Image (cartoon, rainbow, N blue to C red):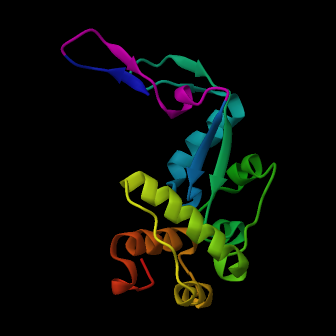
């Protein structure tokens, strides 16, 4: 958040940490966060406060951070994509989820889940998946994991079997 400048009276615009006070912030792909920003996040975690840009007011913050990455922690640390000290603060509880290609039994459930949600979002009737499509989906390697699967379902919802392709 910051203090807005403009022609009217200055107004504070709440930031993500303000909005999530006493809640949880999800940082997806933390290894893509610039190191300078990781350092600032570390300071917020250590001090439980930050200084608001624009007016320099210190703000106490009580949030949980949930960080996700498709890169292994070990690789991220070795390649300097993740600060080791930040990793220690974030690793109070670590969940390692195997890639979708090693959880093939979940694919039919996930296909139905994405189809229901996307159909509702776009105001369309959900499509059903034929046995052939289900087999093809369970044989595919899904290197993009859930994002690739969701993109496939979105294309399938819009076009059906006519343009059945895998990939982003």
Residue furthest right as drawn: 92
In the image, residue 154 lies at what x, y percent?
Answer: 42, 68
Q: Is residue 40 magenta?
A: no
Q: Which residue range is magenta in the image?
A: 7-22
In the image, residue 35 lies at what x, y percent?
Answer: 54, 53
Above or below 4: residue 39: below
Total tally of numbered discs in the picture: 0
Q: Measuring 22% from the left and 11% from the top, which residue is drawn there?
A: 8
Residue furthest top as drawn: 9
Q: Measuring 58% from the left and 62% from the top, which residue is drawn there?
A: 113
Above or below 2: residue 163: below
Location of residue 25 (image quadrant): top right
Q: Is residue 10 left or right of residue 96?
A: left
> Nearest the camera: 73 or 129?
129
In the image, residue 34 lies at what x, y percent?
Answer: 49, 54
Q: Is residue 33 left or right of residue 53?
A: right
Q: Measuring 58% from the left and 74% from the top, which residue is drawn there?
A: 145
* Quadrant in which the N terminus is drawn: top left
* Quadrant in which the C terminus is drawn: bottom left
In the image, residue 98 lies at what x, y percent?
Answer: 72, 73
Q: Is residue 10 magenta?
A: yes
């Amino acid at each position: 958040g910051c203090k807005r400048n403009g022609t009217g009276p200055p107004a504070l615009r709440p930031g993500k940490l303000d909005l999530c006070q006493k809640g949880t912030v999800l940082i997806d792909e933390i290894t893509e966060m610039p190191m300078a920003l990781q350092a600032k996040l570390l300071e917020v975690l250590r001090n439980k406060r930050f200084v608001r840009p624009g007016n320099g007011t210190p703000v106490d913050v009580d949030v949980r951070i949930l960080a996700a990455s498709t890169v292994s922690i070990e690789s991220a640390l070795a390649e300097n994509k993740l600060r080791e000290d930040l990793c220690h603060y974030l690793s109070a509880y670590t969940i390692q989820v195997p890639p979708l290609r090693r959880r093939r039994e979940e694919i039919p459930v996930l296909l139905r889940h994405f189809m229901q949600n996307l159909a509702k979002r776009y105001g369309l009737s959900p499509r059903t998946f034929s046995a052939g499509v289900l087999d093809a989906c369970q044989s595919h390697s899904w290197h993009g994991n859930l994002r690739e699967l969701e993109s496939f379902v979105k294309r399938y919802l819009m076009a059906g079997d006519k343009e059945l392709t895998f990939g982003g």
